[in-house]
Image (cartoon, rainbow, N blue to C red):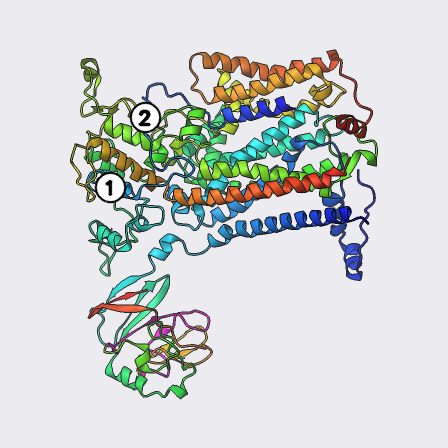
Amino acid sequence: MSGPSKYQPSSAVGKWFHERLPIVAFAKDHALDFPTPKNLNYWWTFGGILAVMLVVQILTGIVLVMHYTPQTDLAFNSVEHIMRDVNYGWLLRYMHMNGASMFFVAVYIHMFRGMYFGSYKAPREVLWMIGVIIYLIMMATAFMGYVLPWGQMSFWGAKVITNLFSAIPFVGDFVTTWLWGGYSVDNPTLNRFFSLHYLLPFVLAAIVFLHIWALHVVGNNNPTGINVKGPQDTLPFHPYYTMKDGFAIVVFLIVYGLFVFYGPNYMGDAVNYVPANPLVTPAHIKPEWYYLPFYAILRAVPDKLLGVIAMFSSILILLALPWLDTSRVRSGTYRPIFKGFFWVFVVVCIGLGFIGSKPPEGSYVLWGRILAFYYFFHFIVILPLLGLLETPKPLPASISDDVLAKQK
Amino acid sequence: MSTAVHADVNRRDFLMIATGAVAGVGAALVAWPFISQMNPDASVLALASIEVDLAPIAEGQAVTVKWRGNPLIIRHRSKADIDTAKAVKVSDLIDSASRNANVKGNADATDDNRVVGGKEQYLVMLGVCTHLGCVPQGDQGDFGVVTGNSTTGGWLCPCHGSQYDTAGRVRKGPAPENLPVPPYVYLTDTKIRVG
Amino acid sequence: MKKFTMLLIAGLVSFTGASFAAENATPAKPISFSFEGPFGTFDKAQLQRGYKVYKEVCSNCHSMRLVAFRNLADHGGPGFTEEQVKALAATFTVKDGPDAEGNMFDRPGLASDRFPSPFPNEQAAAAANGGAAPPDLSLITKAREGWHGTFNQLWSNIGGPQYVYSLLTGYEEPSEEIKKETPEGKHYNPYFVSGHFISMPPPLADGQVTFDDGAPNKVDDMARDVSAFLAWTAEPKMEERKQLGFMVLIFLSVFAGLMYFVKKKIWRDAH
């Protein structure tokens, strides 16, 4: 995408260094000069917001580890020690706890944006698939982090989710015992989850680097979905998008701050302030809100193994999305029928989240099944057919034409 | 260039500088909780004082108790110890400052300034060598009260050979300072509170 | 695009913190406390009265192991003086040791001690209380929900203090039918979180605790005071959190405003 670097070292030392490690040129080309479509809207700022949230989670996490004890008798108390005794411990812990939720808020917006504007389509398939892998690792990281305070929901969440693996035919029991390091979720489990919870964010950071690399090979998609035709269609990333992203990041931080300071436990579960008790299951086990749609799909299938398969498939199907959508037009803006189905799909996902938060009783069971069925129906039937049947609206000639037309 | 353009450029510069300044201040303020969290927390600060009963310590004996994670040496000195310490001229000392948190100002390291008046028999100090922090061993070295083959009083640091006398003053390097006397008060005749 | 925005926001709000409509627990009585809302603070006199109720009534069976006596003098708490804290800590007996001979010994509490538990361990607590160990009260108002529903909890918090208040004032003489269902040694209380039958007998009686400030001491008053006190023990940094949050949000709003104008200036000549 970017041509040969425009970076010219001005000093002799700079030149000497550049010949040995062209990192300054690299940074300038990719963080400052990178040509970016001039029509990106605010939905495109969530990539930057996600990067900020990853940094916030890593920084607050590193300092929390300085005070946390991964031992079943002490873990709960050490978290409360952070909340009560450590200087600003309450702030760091609430930032980390709500940061996870805000991270998922941002990632869901980022993903739905990609789906609406067709950002997964050629040539961005690999970029999209790396994104799906990032999302999977995020889910694993958040799950293991939630276990660490060792409250009731930590414990029972860990037990239920690790028990998913017992559905694997023949080796299921061995796998769960191996995951636990014992016959139940216990101290060995807590220790390994702590170790992995600390490791995975750095793996995530490395894969985010790949994600950005892949992005910079093919360039950004944009709201029109049409290709960049020349320099008249782009702007350098800095200062145009650094400032636009910066503004969006600060606004996002305000929302984040509202939760941290005025509703720190709103997105959590009260039961997690009860220390873990392996002998008593809380009345309603439910995961954190960001897993609820998948939890609903799990429960929609009455068979244990098939339920687990359905749940994992619902995420893995995103890897196939670039080939399931057969339309040649990227952006939903020019696909009148797709647009309607996109919003139905968003509502279905939210509906699944709602069902996931409810006990599996009465009409919730039926609705859960209908919505879970529709979730797959959207990917497997609607998207492939739409691409063949739908007549897209005419596309603008170029990005700059579109921008000029909108300004009139 | 017209003045209108000038004004515009100035306004833009001001806006950029103001925004940059706010961002910088914000970053500095955000850094504070991350730095402050490494300071001693409320539970550590609350445990910072201890009470010690001196009555069980016989003359010529020393006890070591833990205070703020460090060994605190309390020695019930004999008359010989005190006399030996008093006989030393301040000008002969490596470190002539008293290093006593209970004595105001730059007092000399006389024996009187190392203990509480009227309680000269009790020497209370941190057992942390002022060189690199090892714990000096009691009743050793060349600066205690030597009778025949045995030494009483005096401390020798096993790590690098620093020696302290019967008032805990450094007499032989490499340690640069006398063993520090922590803040303490007598609650009763034989009970002190340290910290 | 507006549709996209609105739907997505509505969706995310409705789905964050979605809660169960609990099928059998009666929602807590919606009383209000001084510490609610973005600028709410604790009523120091009320916390001091609540402490007295805890000390004279609750502490006989319930531990509060996460709270230290020194916390009672902390900023944003009941506002006892350091001297008062030392005196009231000394009224508790704390097990310490081992001493030089290796024995554990009892001594009066110090400000740095945490509240001692009335029972040496959970088994002893359960054995002494008909098989149900009284829960630790340090976090009780954060560990219980007074009511359910996503928006309900967004606007009026999770209602932990209201739950405690409702439970303490919610003992009822059961109907004949319920009486038959009541297990041996249990008491009917429709607000109790798990079923309607609770092991704890009604703990408060009118006039049981005499307050130094002469405040009313009916069951209702004492229940309010101790609920407020337990809201503080669960979230002792609440006042600090709200104060810092106010400043942070003002700062971020100013910063966002500046960033908006910077972005606008830069983009003005982009097209």
Mark 1: which amino acid? Arg
Q: Is residue A207 visible?
A: no
Please tell me in which quadrant of the rendered image residue C227 appears.
Answer: top left
Q: Chain of mark 2?
A: C
Mark 2: which amino acid? Ala
How packed mark 2 is, by other alpha carbons closer than 10 Å (few <14, some 14-19, many 20 or more), is many
Element under disc 2: loop
Q: Position of residue B166 (x, y in %)?
A: 32, 80
Q: Is residue B171 visible?
A: yes
How packed mark 1 is, by other alpha carbons closer than 10 Å (few <14, some 14-19, many 20 or more), is many
- Residue found 53% across the figure and 23% down from its top: A293
Q: Which residues are magenta?
A: B119-148
Q: Would residue A378 appear left or right of A272 to someone viewing this image? A: right
- Is the magenta region chiefly helix, strand or loop? loop
Which label sits on residue C28?
2
- Residue found 50% across the figure and 49% down from its top: A63
- Residue found 52% across the figure and 47% down from its top: A62
Earlier sequence position, callout 2 versus callout 1: 2
Q: Would residue A255 appear left or right of A32 to someone viewing this image? A: left
**A256 or C257, which is in the foreground?**
C257
